[in-house]
Image: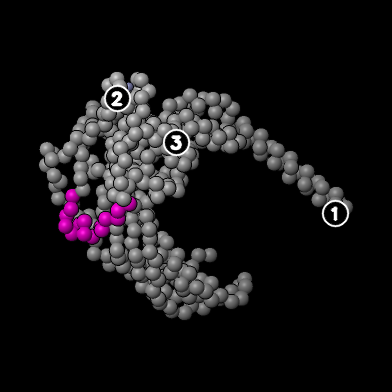
Amino acid sequence: MRCPVTEQITDTSPTPWGRKRKAVQKASDAQSDNRHFPCSNCGADLRYHPGEQKMICTHCGAKQDVPHVDDAAAQVEHSYLDFLKNDSQMAEIEVQSLNCNTCGASVEFNPDEHSRLCPFCDSAIVADVSTQRKIVPQGLLPFSVMEKQAHDHMKTWLVARWFAPNGFESQAAKEHFSGIYVPIWTYDSATTTHYVGERGTTTGTGKNRRTRWRSVSGTVQRGFDDVLVSGTKSVSAEFKDALGPWPLRDLETYQTEFLAGLRAENHTIGLEDGFYNAQSFMRVVITGDIRRDIGGQRQRIHSSQTRFDNQTFKHLLLPVWITHYSLGKNRYRLNVNGRTGKVYGQRPFSKLKLLGASFVMTLAAMGIGLLLSLASGG
Ligand SMILES: [Zn+2]
Ligand SMILES: [Zn+2]
């Protein structure tokens, strides 16, 4: 039985939630994002090559290094409150975007990408290309896994799924991957939480079981570092966590060269909403801390007040390979971490294989039952 918990989490953070940001710079102030890097040899477009970590010409194969920029800017933690107080503006750029009406994703338009299917939900995007303003991220994790390797990781993942139907791997292997940089916020905060609750000590068993409650109060402290929050609604928290961990030590300062031939999704969750989501995550962890601090067999939390200090943030892009594959009438999405190769996807179950497996298990159970009855002389 769960103990009755009355929780009152009051947030005493001075953060002005829901405050609308002032209008950003005039459109003319925003720079256009240059994504075309002509080959010095033949003039064709260079594309970022994850395997080589260089730009390579699509026509003549000439290679060009991504200019070296100090990566310190990628790691800078910006003060959250100073940012809001000064009403600071993040640098913005104008990008050509495709907006998906089905899932709400806003993805940069790439003339090289012929498909007008939304890489996130696979529905056709009929809207025209529009110009949108987006915040320039301070850093990104460049792709290091190539599309071919993403296919290999996908295959290994599928083979390990024993319940996938036959023919499924060869079907899935034909699909094309979209390389997308997904926007993300990371937040840090020191927290101090005062709580009031009760510690329960249980004695006896069955009908004689009794819990004695004693009032307790206390303070727990915890520092959070790089709590990742999705910058878009099209990427669920599960997607972000399931593909992690992300090696944030390898962050590079944002440079458009890393995006040549790839795409980035525009952020649709702002700085303040992102921090609100980060706080929700922090509160779950803090509640666990309070329970441990109360101790005993059972705990009740009546109220808790958390103070958030030293709040900082970063705005980043993370690399994901995304594909969809068909099986029968269904489409499934599969994502590969563009840095570590970790796979997270939806997967089909073969009814025939599941039926076979349950049949084998029933037989095994019957065999064990028979052996046991023989052993006991039945
Ligand atoms: Zn060339
Ligand atoms: Zn979509």
Mark drawn on residue 82: none
Tell me the kind of residue under disc 1. Ser
Instruction: Give residue 182's quadrant in the image.
Output: top left
x and y, in percent, of residue 278 in the image: 34, 55
Q: Is residue 232 visible?
A: no
The relative height of residue 263 versus residue 199 in the rendered view (above or below) is above
Displayed-image quarter of ligand 1: top left
* Pick the front one: 8 or 55: 55
Q: Nearer the viewer, mark 2 or mark 1?
A: 2
- Distance between the Cα atoms at labels 2 and 1? 81 Å
Q: Residue at x 21, y 59 (%)?
A: 82
- Vertical position of residue 86 compared to residue 362: above or below: below
Q: Which residue is mark 3?
A: 145
Q: Nearer the viewer, residue 271 or 277?
A: 271
Helix, strand or loop for disc 3: loop
Some atom of ligand 1 lies within 8 Å of the CB belonging to the residue at label 2:
yes
User: Which residue is depicted at the point 74% across and 40% down?
Assistant: 363
Seen in the picture, residue 325 relative to 219 is either above or below; the reply is above
Q: Which residues are magenta?
A: 74-89
Report which residue position mark 1 lands on: 376
Q: Residues within 10 Å of mark 2 (few under 14, many from 20)?
A: many
For the residue marked with disc 3, what is the amino acid?
Val
Residue 196, position as x, y percentages in the image: 39, 74
Residue at position x 26%, y 51% from top? Answer: 271
Q: Reading the chain from its start, which is encountered first: label 3 or label 2?
A: 2
Up the image or down, 25 lies above or below 116; here it is: below
Q: Nearer the viewer, residue 103 or 273?
A: 273
Label 2 amino acid?
A: Cys
Camera sees residue 336 = yes
